Structure formats: C-alpha cells, structure tokens
Image (cartoon, rainbow, N blue to C red):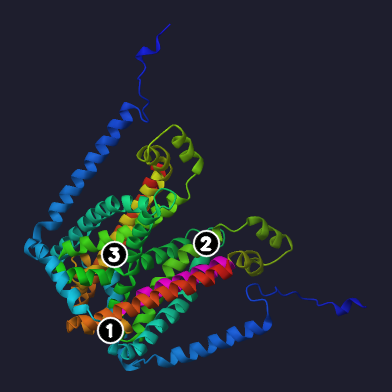
Amino acid sequence: MTASAYPTTWRRPPQIIKSARWRYAVQFGIAIYLALAIGTIEVDWARVAAGLERGQRFVMGFLQPDFVSRWGDISRGLIESLTMTLTSTVVGVIISVPVGIGAARNLVPRAVYLVCRGIIAVSRALQEIIIAIFLVAMFGFGPFAGFLTLSFATIGFLAKLLADDIEEIEPGQVEAVRATGASWWQVVNYAVQPQVMPRLIGLSLYRLDINFRESAVIGIVGAGGIGATLNTAIDRYEYDSAGAILLLIIGIVMIAEYGSSYLRKFLQ
Amino acid sequence: MSTPGHYSEVWRHRTPRARLLLWVGWVALVALFVWCWELMTANTIWVFVTDAPRQAADIGRRMMPPEWGYLPELMVPLWDTINIATLGTLGGVAMAVPVAFLAARNTTPSAMVLRPIALFIIVASRSINSLIWALLLVAIIGPGLLAGIVAIALRSIGFVGKLLYEAIEETDPRQVEAIEATGAGSMQVLTYGIVPQVMPAFWGISVFRWDINIRESTILGLVGAGGIGLKLNASINTLSWDEVAVILLLILGTVVVSEWVSARMRHAII
C-alpha cells in the first residue's frame, strides 16, 4: 500500500450523534420543524418599518435618559420595588428554612418530606406573573400583592435548593453529633446548620437580587413597584423616561450582583 | 498553676465579641425590615387585604369546573408559544456564542475594550426580564409572534452568554497548548482546542434555556407578544375564570412536559 492512500487531511469525528443515519434524520426533522414554525410567523413589514423610527427614538432615549421630568413617579416606584424586595426576601427566607428542612429526606419522616416537597412544587410550577395576577385580584392593586407574590416565589426557590443542599451534607458529622446523645434539634443546630449556613446566606443574597429583578416585572399586572412606572412610561411613548428607568434597573442589578458576590466572599 | 475552675463550663461556638457583632447585625436587619414594611404598606388598603379570603373563595368557585370545551381553541396559541420559545432560543444562542467568546478571559481578542462591552451586553440582557423586552418590542415592532421571539432571544443572550463564557474559562489549558504546539492558527485552536471541550456544556445550557423560555413565553401574550398569554389575558379581562383555569392547567402541563424533555436531553448529552 502506498502512502498516498492515506487521507492527507483530518476531520474531527461527530461527537454527539455517532450514527450517520440518525444524524441525517435529526437534521431533516429540524429542517421540517423550522420550515413549519417560520411559516406561522406573520410579519407585517409595513408595521415594522413604521416601528423602526420609534425604535430609533427609544435608542436615543436610552442614550439620553431623562431622569428629571418624571422623577417623582420613578422614585416612588423604586422605593416600592426596593422595600418589596427586602421584605419579601426576609419573609420568604424565614418560611423557606423550615420547609427546606422538612423537604430534606435525611432529616424527616416520609410524610413530612412529601408535604414539603409538594409545597415547593406548587410554588415553583407557576410563574411569578401568574401568581401576581391572582394575588392582585384578591388583595387589590399595590405593593402588598407584589410582596406576597415574591415571598411565595422565594419559598419554592430557596426551600428546594436548601433541601437539596441538606441532602448532600457530610453524614459523618451528623452521626458524630448524634452519637453524643443529641436530640433532633441539636443535630440540626450543631451538625446540619454549620454545613449549610454559608450556602444559605449566599442563596438568600442571590434571591434578593432575583426578587428585585422580578419586582420590576410584576408591576405590569398591577402589583406595584418600578414595573408599573415603566409600563406607564412605555404606554405614553415617553422613551427617555423609560430609558432612565431601565438604566436604573440595570444599575441596581449590577450593584446588587457585585455587592452580593463581595459579601458572599467576605462571609465564607 | 491555675485551676480549670475559671474556664467557662459550657462550650460556646463564638467569642463574646463575635456574638455581639452578630447580634447587632440581626437587630439592624430587623430594624431595616420594619422600616421597609412601614414604607411599603403606607398606601395599602387593609380592607381589601382582610377581604382577600372571601375573594379567593369566590375566584376558586368560579374556576370550578374548568371550561374544557375551550381546549381545542387553545391549540394554535400553544403551537405559537412553543415556536416563540424555540425560535427565540435559537436566535438567542446564535447571538450569545460570539458574545461568550469575547467575554471569556482566555479567548477574548482584547481584554481592554471588547471584554467589558461583552460583559455589559450580558448584564443588560440578564437584568431586563423578557416581559419588559416584550413590552418594548411590542411598542417598536408591533404586537405579534415576532416581538415575542425577539424578546426571548434578547433575554437568552445574557443567560447563555454568562454560563458559556464561564465554561470557556474553565477549559483545560493543556489541550489548547497541545493544539498550539502543532502550529495551529488561532481559529484552529478555537475549533480543535476549545470548542470540543465546551460542546457538552453548550448543548446542556441551550436545552436548559429552552426549558426556561417555554415557561416565559407562556406569559408574553399578557403584553401582546403572541402565544397562549394572549388568550389568558383575554379570559382574565372578561373575568371568565373557568377559561383561566383551563389555560393555567394547559400551561402547567406544557411546562412539566418541557421540563421532562429537557431533563432527558441533558441526561443523554452530558
């Protein structure tokens, strides 16, 4: 055999779907889906063209934000959002700690485990915004409904992650504390809590950050906060005020993100 | 020689100073909470709040039994919703990949200029919820599926970009070095040294984001961006809670199915 029979170039073999036939089938399926899906989009290009001018005005508004002329409304919305964020995170954490402990399989009997996992599933299944719609219908407009929404959503998030974390702790420490004759409370306090505390603090700070972002949204359905102000600004085509609000949201989220990562590093 | 008598009999986890600091911290948190609570509830109408259980019972009664005859009418909006999520994810991923390569410390061409810009794109996209993107886009390009797709795509950039650039930064530098040692150009290093290492993470992140996008696209219709949310909004506005119940159950079912699909796919890939 001569050397020229060898291929002179090399191609990386496919990695995920190894069989060529399946690969073609999958590609074909994707092509059909895309054709069908793109076919259902109706685009009114005249409307898009008309909107581009508006988009340009929005970009200009973003570049030259107007903080001043609606400052009263903006600051009221921001105060509502920030207070809602803090109170709902605190209440959510307080409720989710017992629920999270109850949802850890290695600490509680099976009945309690199932009930707590059920609470978590209900809280996680529904979008914040849908919960907000219902709570606004029940409790009336304003930040109180938003506070309840965010607290409820916090329970599902935090309790699940806390429970998963407790299930993964070092069993040796629990056994050691239990061997001293400690009661269930003492086991939780001296063996479980020190192991999950840094992560609980980190998750709470992370949730604070998420709650602020969500508080900017649930105002759209009437649950108070900066979202309501933003919705009004966009509805009135005041893009410079809307740009200012969006910049404030981005700024606060960035501060919260860097602040919480710094705080987490400091606490651990 | 000192007797052990002056030692504290009970073991304590913290020194007195640390305990005091901790205590001050807790008091400050409680004070902040109370202050925020006062500020937040200043305008709350408590009559509505105390009335809430009755309202809840009323809504609950109106939701039962769900109006199942409404279900066939929801199939087209559901298909639209799934399309918004899927096409939005595709668009978002396509835009996120270059951003991620620009943002990763080990692949960025210029750490001084392009990296901060890429990081700002990621943060801006992440901090604005898809509903707000949809609100803006409906005002700009008009109501409909396109606004929803673009909103989902813009929102996905931040999520996919952030996770992907972290995956790129965590790649094994020795493999990159080995490819470099063969005399490969920078594009070849990228395709043979880095891309194979981040490929599983990339697929995992994309499928995960698709799953989240299915959830988010169900509500985009509330601001007019198409899909099943439009129907939800219409039913809520006409107070037909029995139709709302059907829509919510359908959304719940869709979310559960998409979560199952994404879990299976991620399991198969990773």
Q: Is residue B238 left or right of residue B129?
A: left
Q: Chain of mark 2?
A: B
- C-alpha separation, residue under disc 2 versus residue under disc 3: 34 Å
* Residue at 27%, 61% in the rendered image: A152
Amino acid type for the residue under numbered disc 1? Leu
Residue B110: give its label. Answer: 2
Residue situated in front as seen by the camera: B112 or B163: B163
Q: Chain of mark 3?
A: A
A41, above or below B190, in the image: below
Q: Is residue A253 left or right of residue B174?
A: left
Amino acid type for the residue under numbered disc 2? Ser
Q: Quadrant of the C terminus of chain B?
A: bottom right
Residue A192 in the magenta stretch? The answer is: no
The percent coordinates of residue A93 (x first, y second) are 30, 52
Residue A214: give its label. Answer: 3
Q: Are marks 2 and 3 in contact (CB under 8 Å)?
A: no
| Disc 3 secondary structure class | helix
Q: Is residue A40 left or right of residue B241?
A: right
Residue B209 in the magenta stretch? The answer is: yes
The percent coordinates of residue B193 (x first, y second) are 65, 64
The first of marks 2 and 1 along the sequence is 2
Q: Total of numbered circles in the picture?
A: 3
Viewer-side label of 1, 3 = 1
Magenta span: B199-220
* Residue at 44%, 61% in the rendered image: B116
Asked if marks 2 and 3 fall on the same chain, the answer is no
Mark 1 crowdedness (10 Å alpha carbons): few <14, some 14-19, many ≥20? many
Residue B230: give its label. Answer: 1
Q: In the image as oriented, which residue stretches furthest toward the top?
A: B1
